[in-house]
Every structure is written in C-alpha cells, then in structure tokens.
Amino acid sequence: MEDFSNIITKLEQKYRKLIRFILKDLRVKDHSDVLEIGSGPGWIGIWMAQENPTLNITGLDLSEDMIRVANKNKIKENVQDRVKYIKGNAEHMDIFADNTFDVIFSNESLHHWINPKNVFNEISRVLKTNGLFCITDGKRNLGFKAKLKFHVLKYTIPKIIRKGWKASIMAGYTKDEIDQILKETDLKGKYKIKEDSLNLIIHNIKK
C-alpha cells in the first residue's frame, strides 16, 4: 500500500487540478463537510484540506490497510485535525444520517462499485439539499489521444501499474451507460456528465 501511495504523490499536479475544479468551478463553500468515497491512501482529501483549511473531510474506504496508510499520510501533512477516515461500504452508508454532507466526491472508484445505483442513491440521501457532488472515473471507450498516451506510457511505468490501469479501463463505463444508470436513481435530473479523451466527470447541474 505504501508503494501505491508513493505513486499517487507523483500525480499530485493532476489531482490538484481536479481539486481546483471541485472547489472553484463547483463553488464549494468554506467550512463545508466533505465526504470522499474511495479515499485510498488519502492524498486527494489531504491536498483538498491544504487548498482550503476550513473544510472538514471524511474519507470512506473498504480497506483497513488503505486507511492505515491514509492516517499516516494525514499526520505527515499535518491535517489530522481536519481529515478522518472510516471503514465502510458506499452502497450502505448507514453510519451517516440523511443530509449530512455539503460535498461528496469520488475519484477513480466508480468502476469498483458492485451496485452503482445503490451508491448513487446513498449519495443522494446523505448529501444536503443544496449539496455538491462530483464523481470522476476513467471511461472504457478511450479517445484517440488517450490510446496514444497509453501506448507511450506503457513503456515508462511499472508492469504492475500498467496492468492495473488497463484493468481499470476495461471495467469502466461509457457516458451513455452511466447516464442510463443515473436515470434510474434518486439523482435523476440533478446531474451533468462531461467527458474528455480519458475520463467521465459527473457533477451537479449548476443553478
């Protein structure tokens, strides 16, 4: 897990760009309670806490080992007073009451969700009425630029990471597939899906 954590730090600028999109473009308010689904080694939530020190961030993850590493990382980065991690399944977030969070986000975990409809319904339940959400993940139908990038990078990254990346792509959704899933959830009519050559970005419709 420590090796995976170190790899994530090498992608810091990529993830800080995502963080700025969530905080600035979606207009996250100061002092918001934030939930990250699939927090892994914790870096995105940690960097978000550094970008806006008023936020209170909760990371939810199935892996005790990931939570162990995330707790080490938050102490190392001195954000332990504003970031915490809980073991749990996003399909059944009974540990959280209705209307708990101002912001919910998830990055690169959607393709792991066994029943995404349940997760989206839980997101709707625990999100406050005027809350913000942003779910990002790789898509299965890569664009030409993404295929070219993968072809180049496969010679420069470790085999185990390359194998995991390819498996994640194959497990991903297309825009149409995720749109159909969302239409059958409590988030129906409340979302917008954007895509680039690599990723899907699902977020609130701006009012």
Image (tube, rainbow, N blue to C red):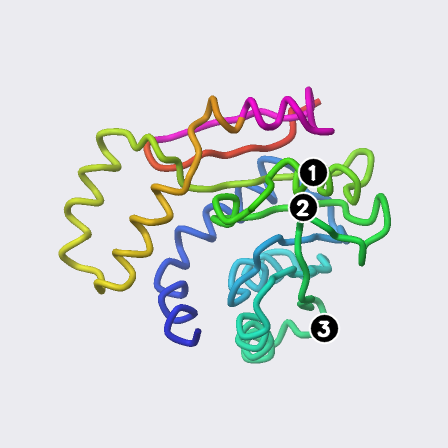
Residue nearest the viewer, comparing 207 with 199: 199
Amino acid type shown at disc 2 = Ile
Compared with 39, 136 (above or below) is: above
Was residue 184 drawn as part of the magenta stretch in this picture?
yes
Going by the image, does 155 lie left or right of 48? left
Give the residue at x 41% y 59%: 12
Query: Sequence-wise, which precedes: disc 1 or disc 2?
Result: 2
Q: Are marks 1 and 2 in contact (CB under 8 Å)?
A: yes
Residue nearest the viewer, comparing 16 with 94: 94
Farthest front residue in view: 114
Magenta residue span: 179-196
Give the residue at x 40% y 41%: 138
Give the residue at x 56% y 40%: 135
Compared with 67, 114 (above or below) is: above
Closer mark to the observer between disc 3 and disc 1: 1
Q: Residues within 10 Å of mark 2 (few under 14, many from 20)?
A: many
Going by the image, does 54 lie left or right of 18? right
Amino acid type shown at disc 3 = Asp
The circle on residue 132 is 1
Going by the image, does 129 lie left or right of 60? right
Q: Quadrant of residue 141?
A: top left
Q: Secondary structure at mark 2?
A: strand
Q: What residue is shown with label 2? A: 104
Q: Secondary structure at mark 3?
A: loop
The circle on residue 95 is none
Query: Sequence-wise, which precedes: disc 3 or disc 1?
Result: 3
- Place of residue 53 in the rendered image (x, y in percent of width and height, measured from the top left): 67, 61
- The quarter of the image holding the C terminus is top right
Q: What residue is shown with label 3? A: 81
